[in-house]
């Protein structure tokens, strides 16, 4: 999730009662060229930060948030704490909500990238601090058309109560300032929101309400609790949610987006599958989509004439919908491997799959450059001219330059090249 820094403000508290490395892939004109740039440190969400207040207390006392703790019980008996976002978050929210002409598809890229980062962090902590290996990690995405929700879940490092406050209630000031400045001057692009470390809030491009349930990996196993963070944009609430089910046994985070009326297209599993293959095809951890498949069962055709003696009854095929988890990212980013260990058949398969080509590459170049900027390059020269370029060499459909950062597709529009 988005990183944060201390705000240094004071918190007012009242009591009420309620319910509970960078990669660049290029293929130029007649060539399908893929160049991958590594080590884009802050393009996506950077690492989390911890903070303390002026008197050394934990960040909860120094947040510039107003908090009201609900101490009276209801049916569930869970205390609900109410917070207001600090001013910087409010500015980002205003920009996101009012971005009527922005590319809303990027919200999925940002939330999936954050989930993958959480899995990466859990793996790192298990190797450096844990005594046992972590459970197999993956991401799961599911829609509910009746409730109009989209759920993105991972069994990564998760967040504790204070992590939810720090990471989702506040934003790194430097990143926020740059984001607000660029957007305010009309020079920015909301689709690059992850560059500023505020990618989580892109969820509000398509949702009017977001719920985050999380259980932290960094607590002792017996002390791990599930907390639920809820926001509709102007403020957020936090409460313990022991009844909230997560598929991760050790830890994890589940984000539920309550989609806006104009964003119902993201309930279509076909649309989600296309976006996942576009933006997140090379993510390290498996991404599973709850997808509908049609199967055909053979049943007796009751409308057919009765069979004669000794004959079998006439059968017919009846379609049946079956929902199952389907992995979206099976292709591996071979540009990250050393050229010496990649054979020609692997290059050919990657070329055909990535660029939807039917011919064999005429030649392939795979290299790495190190210096102030480090990148790896994988260059394909096709045997025949790509179809989209036969009529117009500069057609937009013929874009063959692709920018990837941390295995995530970022952009394919480069007007200066």
Image (cartoon, rainbow, N blue to C red):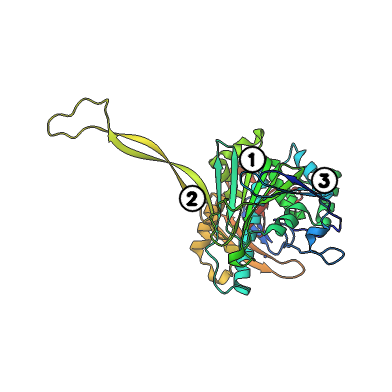
* Residue 383 in sight from this viewpoint: no
Disc marking residue 326: 2
The quadrant in which residue 225 appears is bottom right
Residue 358 x, y percent position in the rendering: 50, 50
Task: Please name which of the two marks, 1 or 2, marks the residue nearer to the observer.
Answer: 1
Residue extending furthest toward the front: 72
Badge 1 is on which residue? 258
* Quadrant including the N terminus: bottom right
* Residue 398 in sight from this viewpoint: yes
Residue 136 x, y percent position in the rendering: 52, 63
Among the two numbered marks 1 and 2 on one chain, the one whose residue lies closer to the N terminus: 1
Q: Residues within 10 Å of mark 1 (few under 14, many from 20)?
A: many
Among the two numbered marks 3 and 2 on one chain, the one whose residue lies closer to the N terminus: 3
Residues at discs 3 and 2 in contact (Cβ within 8 Å): no
In this view, 371 is above or below 319? below
Residues at discs 1 and 2 in contact (Cβ within 8 Å): no
Residue 77 x, y percent position in the rendering: 64, 48
In this picture, residue 182 sits left or right of residue 363: right
CA gap between label 3 and label 1 equals 22 Å
Task: Please name which of the two marks, 3 or 2, marks the residue nearer to the observer.
Answer: 3
In this picture, residue 389 sits left or right of residue 12: left
CA gap between label 1 and label 2 equals 23 Å
In this view, 48 is above or below 387? below
Disc marking residue 91: 3
Task: Please name which of the two marks, 3 or 1, marks the residue nearer to the observer.
Answer: 1
Q: Residues within 10 Å of mark 2 (few under 14, many from 20)?
A: some
Q: Residues within 10 Å of mark 3 (few under 14, many from 20)?
A: some
Mark 3 secondary-structure assignment = helix
Residue 192 x, y percent position in the rendering: 74, 50
């Amino acid at each position: 999730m988005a990183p944060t820094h201390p705000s240094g403000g004071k918190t007012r508290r009242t009591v009420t009662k309620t319910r509970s490395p960078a990669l660049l892939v290029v293929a130029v004109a007649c060539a399908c060229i893929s160049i991958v740039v590594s080590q884009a440190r802050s393009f996506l969400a950077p690492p989390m930060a911890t903070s303390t207040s002026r008197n050394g207390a934990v960040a909860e006392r120094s947040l510039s948030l107003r908090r009201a703790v609900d101490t009276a019980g209801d049916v569930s008996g869970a205390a609900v704490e109410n917070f207001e976002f600090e001013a910087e978050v409010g500015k980002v929210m205003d920009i996101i909500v009012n971005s009527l002409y922005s590319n809303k598809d990027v919200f999925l890229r940002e939330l999936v990238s954050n989930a993958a980062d959480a899995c990466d962090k859990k793996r790192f902590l298990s190797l450096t601090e844990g005594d046992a290996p972590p459970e197999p990690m993956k991401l799961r995405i599911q829609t509910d058309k009746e409730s109009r929700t989209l759920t993105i879940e991972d069994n990564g490092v998760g967040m504790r109560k204070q992590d939810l406050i720090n990471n989702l209630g506040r934003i790194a000031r430097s990143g926020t300032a740059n984001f607000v400045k660029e957007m305010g001057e009309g020079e920015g692009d909301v689709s690059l929101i992850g560059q500023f470390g505020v990618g989580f809030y892109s969820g509000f491009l398509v949702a009017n309400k977001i719920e985050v349930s999380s259980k932290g990996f960094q607590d002792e196993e017996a002390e791990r609790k599930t907390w639920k963070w809820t926001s509709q944009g102007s403020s957020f609430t936090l409460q313990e949610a022991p009844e909230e089910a997560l598929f991760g046994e050790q830890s994890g985070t589940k984000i539920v987006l309550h989609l806006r009326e104009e964003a119902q297209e993201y309930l279509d599993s076909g649309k989600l599958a296309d976006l996942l293959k576009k933006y997140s095809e090379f993510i390290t951890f498996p991404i599973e989509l709850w997808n509908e498949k049609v199967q055909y069962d053979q049943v007796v055709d009751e409308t057919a004439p009765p069979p004669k003696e000794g004959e079998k009854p006439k059968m017919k095929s009846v379609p049946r919908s079956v929902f199952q988890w389907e992995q979206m990212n099976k292709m591996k980013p071979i540009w990250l491997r050393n050229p010496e260990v990649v054979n020609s058949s692997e290059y050919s398969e990657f070329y055909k799959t990535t660029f939807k080509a039917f011919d064999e590459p005429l030649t392939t170049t795979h290299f790495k450059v190190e210096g102030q900027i480090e990148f790896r390059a994988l260059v394909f020269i096709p045997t025949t001219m790509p179809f989209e370029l036969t009529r117009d060499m500069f057609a937009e459909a013929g874009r063959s330059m692709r920018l990837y950062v941390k295995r995530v597709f970022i952009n394919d529009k480069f007007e200066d090249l």
